[in-house]
Image (spheres, rainbow, N blue to C red):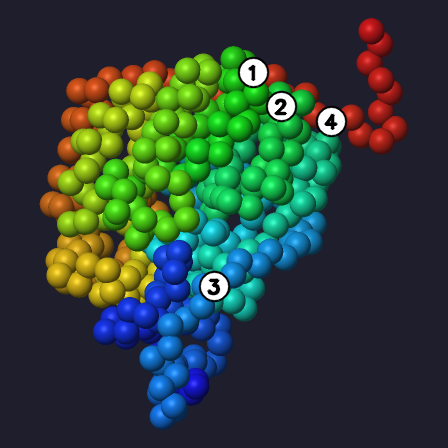
Amino acid sequence: MFTTARYPCAMDPAQPHLLRKGRGAASNPSCRFEPTSRVACDDGWGSLDEELPPLATTVQVDTARTVITRNRSPDIPFDRSINPYRGCEHGCVYCYARPTHAYLGLSPGQDFESRLFAKPDAPALLTGELARPGYRCEVIALGTNTDPYQPIERGRRITRGILEVLAAHNHPVGIVTKSNLVVRDIDILAPMAAKRLAKVFISITPLDRGLARRLEPRAPSPARRLEALGQLAAAGIPAGVMVAPVIPALTDGEIERILEAVAGAGGRSAGYVLLRLPLEVKDLFVEWLAVHVPGKAKRVMSLVRQTRGGRAYDSTWGLRMRGTGPYAEMIARRFHLACKRLGLNRRDWALDTGQFRPPPRPGDQLALL
């Protein structure tokens, strides 16, 4: 049974049978906008001793009126992005986008990775927005909030439809994904890359497959991501890696190994982001530590706080991606030296915005041949 309380509910680490198989978050706490939270308690009939069934994924249609999201963040190198989906089935427990599900009245926990929203009208909406008078072309980022190549993209093909629109009008795009499904669209991306209109970053957290399976349970294995990076590079598409997030005392020891693997696969560029724990993500991640790596939990969070001025998270512009303090400086130094040694980040990856041709608007005359 469930009772209500004014504090987040959490799974008891001593009850591993309550974990949902194939899910990253260990619990499904109420969102921050709800006045109460549900807490599981034993009703005397042994209900908490029963193993939970697998959590099914559901997909609803997101009837958005626009598809391009704008931002004014001074520490982000793009001012517009597209997210074909809300929620992400990859289930990465550390995902900084989890709190956005609260705006839908849903939990940033297991709801975020199982109750998804798709935007099937995204390609048509994008065509209309690119055709608006006064539209100014800048690089559109795909994969900034949730992954554009998460499992449901295989059947829905919304991301592919978006790329078809961008390619038709010579609009530059930058992609970040954890999925090898991106190679499906090499037929679109390679011709765009030849015109300096496309680049792709593959995100890798650890190379350790066992750890990756617990951190990001429904994302492709690190080995498959590296293979995809090699395929992209072989097709002439500028490909690189985002080592993200770097988790203190858990994945930080793999930085150099990841960069070496990327360089060996043909990657040209690399970036990293230090672990971010905004809003509900903090409690979900602490809970994950207690369940999966209890012996490291205190050490991990101690180092996290050392990089965030004594707190679990600092959202200050310019600091939220890298952190501060000696430990954060050491990570930055290691990353820089490894990239320099491996020849990464030597070439300018700037995409060309000058080739953009807007879609014709109703009433426009056709150009004379």
Identify the amino acid type marked 4: Pro
Q: Name the residue under label 1.
A: 191
Q: Where is residue 7 in the image (x, y as percent from the top left)?
A: 36, 79
Q: What residue is shown at x 60% (from left), y 30% (from top)?
A: 163
Instruction: Tell which tag, 4 or 3, sits nearer the viewer.
Output: 3
Q: What residue is shown at x 60% (from left), y 33% (from top)?
A: 160
Q: Which of marks 3 and 1 is nearer the N terminus?
A: 3
Question: Given contact means CB atoms under 8 Å apart, are the residues at marks 4 and 1 in contact?
Answer: no
Q: How far apart are marks 4 and 3 (CA)?
A: 42 Å
Q: Distance between the residues labelled 4 and 2?
A: 11 Å
Q: Mark 3 points at which residue?
A: 55
Q: What residue is shown at x 70% (from left), y 44% (from top)?
A: 121
If the image is split into quadrants, where does the C terminus sit? Answer: top right
Q: Where is residue 47 in the image (x, y as percent from the top left)?
A: 39, 83
Q: Quadrant of residue 14?
A: bottom left
Relative to 92, 235 lies left or right: right
Relative to 166, 299 lies left or right: left
